[in-house]
């Protein structure tokens, strides 16, 4: 098939970006969306043009690197699917496709479709862990955990940290990302000791990074490639309220 | 070059304890006077960086991804082994040790493998303490599944994304140390060279992949945890950016490269669909617990899979290996798939595929159970192929997946360059000629959490080095070399893309150094690779500049190293005149077509010394001593 692509090009963070139109031909339905971009890039290189830069690595939907907004939707039209797992059989000959980076103030563009998502790492540094030094921990079966709780923890732990939730939100809120981590630990006995300071510290860092607040549009859940539920945000809000009444944030 | 494995003396079960006692310690207050560089933040690197920081060392960690959480450990699906014996089915440290030595076809060290089995139990405890949500039974205790090459259930798992959960555990521990200021983390930084001062590894040179700046880092020791080299075959299950550069640069600086020909071809991947293919996707080996592998009995079968009656199906693994059946080890399963396809009985549009069929399991357990066990894998398969595996059998074919070879290390995980340590898939140490399923995660975390934090202390306490800074002449020289090399790559202005040359290299490697090799083919590859390298340096094209994000330049640097490394792999395969594990030389097989090992002449680690581009490397042998297991022909029948 033949496609018309409109792609955001931007040399670096300081440069001004714009949409540029390209045509690609010979796209097969078994190709992934990123392999379609590979075809374009090979053509650009041979024409002495710089290839379109985009983050990608595992191409199996698990590393969370790929981060394209396709026709206005982070990760494109397919539900619970990262863009690397979207295949061209979902498109047809003659389609026009608009490809942009994940847009948010907290995710500055580094080049073309590549953004800086280190804000997520800094939120994790603020509290996304159980403080268990290596060694000196009890036997793994010493603490039984109900299957239900373990499953709920796993549902939330499935987050790949891609940032689609932020890109989809009109407030550029990172609530779903933060709530998924807070909830994973909230469902597990291992997470209880630091439960209150974790939620306070992570939310404080989230605010410092310039992410917006949640106004319940649920766009985040709609685009999440791992299907993480907004009910985790409700849990986080409850935990945050409770913690803020009884604990002080540790800066 | 002298290779001393430094295996501690004494009975096998006491070696590690004894060694831990004999190693020198650094007192807690003095640890902060030492600094260590860790390259790579996968399971091994993140675990090592976090644990050493917890102990008090100053750690600098680097990765080429935008976040430490994206290392390719994250893609491991099936699970992690440990000798917990929670299932009461006869497992023990000894059995895990024995299965691993046997699975590796007796080409690994007893001492290392026993230690791996010992610390496997600590890993599970540690991960649970970190909040890794392993699968549990209704009683609240941990669940296990079985994996290839074992007759016990010792594999712990978190749905089909165990690697992700383990990596996020290690990443969280790392993030905590970054937050505490004990680890300086540099993302989007790619290591370009290792720097030696007076023969000791004292730092690295890296390229900032956003600004293009070439920057140096100095320390008291360097750790490489930079993964494997499957991408020398172009198509593999590795992530696109996985590369051999860090390990290969160390090799060029004098580190021995061990057993590069030992690569693993995973039996259950989604088959290649066309020339556009950029990578291959694994379907977890855990699927073989319930899926049955078969091909049509007859060549030229035209019926669809569901129309082929039982009597016309050949469940070849169950037929040839009745006691392990569909759970036979990876090398044997892969080679069997190749055999039936070479006979013309392969399925799918290319004829290079076999069926992995869940019909019987769905009849027996119900669709719901299968969905609960493998739902995400079935969904992934459906997305990629457009076929529904609940109603049509999956089509699978072997693909490059893991590399057992790597930089040579001693029992302390130190290479023959003092101070240069190598962890995880990047070293060669524990899997011999074939790795068992669910053992890569085990080894990465064992090295990172429970081995290097001890052995690095001994090195630092005994090396007694002067402090160096990046102003040292050796750093300046290395930086100049790196800049020169990057400039040379940027000057390439021919008519072929780097990717097209990489793809061609992959064809050569798959054809002549893939699942089955022979002397003539390997010699042919050794002629073709230098020609292709020449083509690269005379006719490749790299665009853009060195001051911005430039994926074209990054790829070119990695492919340039693969084009040299590929020769090393072929030399090793040609030297090893036997078949063992993943290394199958067609000249050396039994009448039944099974691998024919030669323990008299080849029970050694082949460690290669660099002598120059295109020049034959020098072979050094580390003889393998087996005091506790008897070398036998592997049988899974």
Image (cartoon, coloured by chain):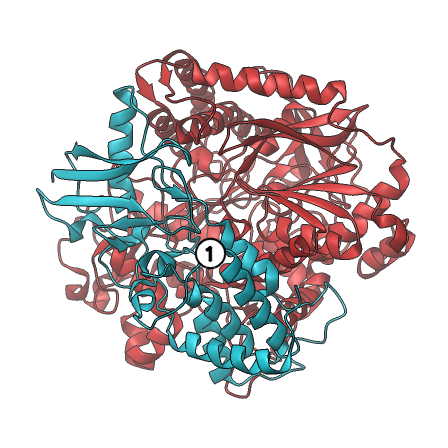
* Above or below B126: residue A191: below
Q: Which chain is cyan?
A: A
Q: Name the secondary structure under disc 1.
A: loop
At which x and y percent is residue A200?
58, 71
In depth, the one of A158 and B113 nearer the eye is A158
* Residue B272 visible in image: no
As drawn, B355 above or below B617:
below
Instruction: Please name the residue shown 50% across and 33% down the image.
Output: B209
Give the red chain's letter.
B
In the image, B276: left or right of B287?
A: left
Q: Residues within 10 Å of mark 1 (few under 14, many from 20)?
A: some
Residue B72 location, x and y as percent? 49, 49
Task: Please state the chain letter of the residue tagged with numbered disc 1 in the rendered image.
Answer: A
| Residue at x 30% of width, y 51% of height | A83
Which of these two is toward me, B326 or B560?
A: B560
Q: Residue B470 at x, y = what percent?
A: 73, 27
Q: Is residue B287 left or right of residue B588?
A: left
Left or right: where does residue A30 sit relative to residue A139? left
Residue B106 visible in the current orientation: yes
* Residue B624 coordinates in the image, percent (x, y): 73, 42
Residue at the image point whose x is 76% and y is 38% from the top: B221
| Figure disc tally | 1
Vertical comparison of B403 with B322: above or below:
above
Q: Which residue is mark 1?
A: A210
Q: Quadrant of residue B175?
A: bottom right
- Quarter of the image with the N terminus of chain A in it: top left
């Amino acid at each position: 098939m033949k496609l018309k692509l409109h792609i955001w090009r931007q040399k670096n963070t300081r440069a001004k970006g714009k949409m540029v139109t390209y045509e690609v031909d010979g796209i097969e339905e078994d190709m992934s969306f990123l392999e379609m971009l590979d075809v374009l890039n090979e053509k650009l290189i041979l024409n002495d043009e710089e290839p379109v830069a985009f983050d990608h690595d595992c191409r199996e939907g698990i590393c969370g690197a790929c981060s394209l907004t396709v026709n206005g939707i982070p990760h494109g039209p397919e539900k619970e699917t990262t863009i690397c797992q979207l295949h061209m059989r979902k498109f047809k000959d003659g389609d026009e496709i608009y490809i942009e980076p994940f847009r948010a103030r907290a995710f500055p563009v580094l080049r073309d479709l590549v953004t800086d998502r280190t804000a997520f790492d800094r939120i994790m540094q603020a509290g996304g862990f159980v403080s268990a030094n290596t060694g000196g921990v009890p036997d793994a079966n010493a603490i039984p955990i109900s299957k239900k709780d373990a499953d709920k923890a796993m549902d939330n732990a499935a987050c790949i940290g891609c940032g689609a939730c932020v890109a989809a939100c009109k407030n550029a809120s990172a609530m779903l990302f933060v709530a998924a981590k807070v909830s994973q630990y909230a469902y597990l006995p291992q997470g209880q000791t630091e439960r209150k300071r974790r939620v306070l510290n992570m939310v404080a860092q989230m605010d410092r990074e310039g992410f917006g607040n949640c106004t319940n549009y649920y766009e985040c859940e709609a685009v999440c490639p791992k299907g993480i539920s907004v009910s985790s945000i409700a849990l986080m809000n409850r935990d945050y309220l409770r913690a803020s009444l009884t604990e002080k944030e540790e800066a | 070059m002298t290779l001393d494995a430094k295996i501690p003396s004494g009975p096998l079960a006491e070696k590690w304890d004894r060694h831990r006692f004999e190693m020198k310690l650094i007192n807690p207050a003095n640890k902060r006077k030492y600094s260590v560089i860790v390259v790579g933040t996968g399971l091994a690197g993140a675990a090592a960086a976090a644990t050493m920081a917890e102990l008090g060392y100053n750690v600098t960690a680097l990765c080429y991804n935008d976040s430490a959480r994206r290392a390719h450990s994250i893609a491991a699906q099936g699970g992690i082994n440990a000798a917990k014996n929670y299932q009461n089915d006869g497992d023990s440290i000894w059995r895990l040790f024995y299965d691993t030595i046997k699975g590796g076809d007796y080409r690994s060290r007893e001492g290392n493998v026993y230690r791996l089995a010992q610390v496997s139990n600590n890993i599970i405890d540690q991960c649970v303490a970190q909040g890794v949500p392993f699968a549990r039974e209704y009683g609240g205790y941990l669940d296990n599944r079985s994996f290839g090459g074992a007759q016990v259930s010792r594999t712990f798992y978190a749905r089909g994304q165990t690697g992700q959960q383990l990596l996020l555990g290690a990443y969280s521990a790392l993030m905590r140390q970054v937050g505490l200021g004990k680890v300086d983390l540099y993302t989007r930084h790619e290591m370009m060279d290792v720097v030696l001062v007076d023969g000791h590894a004292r730092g690295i040179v890296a390229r900032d992949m956003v600004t293009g700046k070439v920057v140096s880092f100095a320390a008291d020791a360097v750790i490489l945890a930079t993964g494997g080299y499957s991408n020398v075959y172009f198509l593999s299950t590795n992530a696109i950016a996985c590369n051999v550069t860090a390990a290969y640069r160390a090799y060029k600086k004098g580190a021995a490269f061990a057993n590069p020909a030992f690569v693993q071809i995973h039996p259950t991947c989604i088959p290649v669909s066309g020339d556009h293919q950029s990578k291959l996707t694994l379907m977890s080996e855990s699927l073989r617990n319930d899926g049955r592998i078969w091909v049509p009995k007859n060549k030229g079968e035209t019926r669809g899979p569901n129309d082929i009656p039982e009597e016309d199906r050949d469940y070849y693994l169950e037929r040839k290996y009745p006691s392990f059946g569909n759970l036979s080890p990876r090398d044997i399963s892969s080679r069997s798939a190749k055999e039936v396809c070479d006979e013309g009985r392969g399925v799918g549009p290319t004829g290079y595929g076999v069926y992995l069929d869940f019909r019987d399991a769905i009849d027996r357990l119900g669709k719901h159970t299968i969905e609960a066990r493998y739902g995400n894998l079935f969904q992934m398969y459906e997305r990629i192929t457009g076929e529904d595996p609940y109603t049509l059998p999956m089509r699978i074919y072997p693909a490059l997946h893991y590399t057992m070879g790597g930089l040579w290390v001693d029992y302390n995980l130190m290479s023959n360059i003092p101070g240069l340590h190598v962890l995880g898939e990047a070293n060669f140490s524990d899997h011999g000629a074939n790795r068992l399923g669910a053992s890569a995660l085990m080894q990465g975390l064992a090295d990172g959490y429970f081995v290097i934090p001890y052995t690095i202390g001994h090195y630092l306490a005994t090396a007694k080095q002067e402090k160096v800074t990046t102003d040292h002449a050796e750093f300046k020289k290395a930086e100049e070399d790196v800049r020169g090399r990057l400039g040379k790559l940027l000057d390439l202005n021919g008519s072929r893309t780097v990717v097209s040359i990489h793809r061609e290299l992959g064809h050569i490697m798959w054809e002549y150094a893939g699942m089955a090799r022979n002397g003539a083919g390997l010699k042919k590859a050794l002629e073709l690779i230098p020609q292709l390298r020449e083509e690269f340096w005379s006719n490749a094209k790299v665009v853009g500049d060195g001051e911005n994000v430039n994926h074209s330049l990054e790829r070119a640097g990695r492919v340039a190293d693969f084009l040299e490394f590929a020769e090393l792999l072929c030399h090793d395969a040609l030297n090893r005149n036997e078949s063992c594990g993943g290394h199958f030389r067609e000249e050396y097989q039994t009448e039944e077509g099974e691998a024919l090992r030669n323990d008299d002449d080849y029970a050694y680690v082949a460690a290669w010394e660099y002598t120059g581009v295109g020049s034959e490397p020098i072979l050094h042998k580390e003889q393998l001593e087996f005091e506790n297991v008897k070398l036998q022909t592997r049988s899974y029948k």
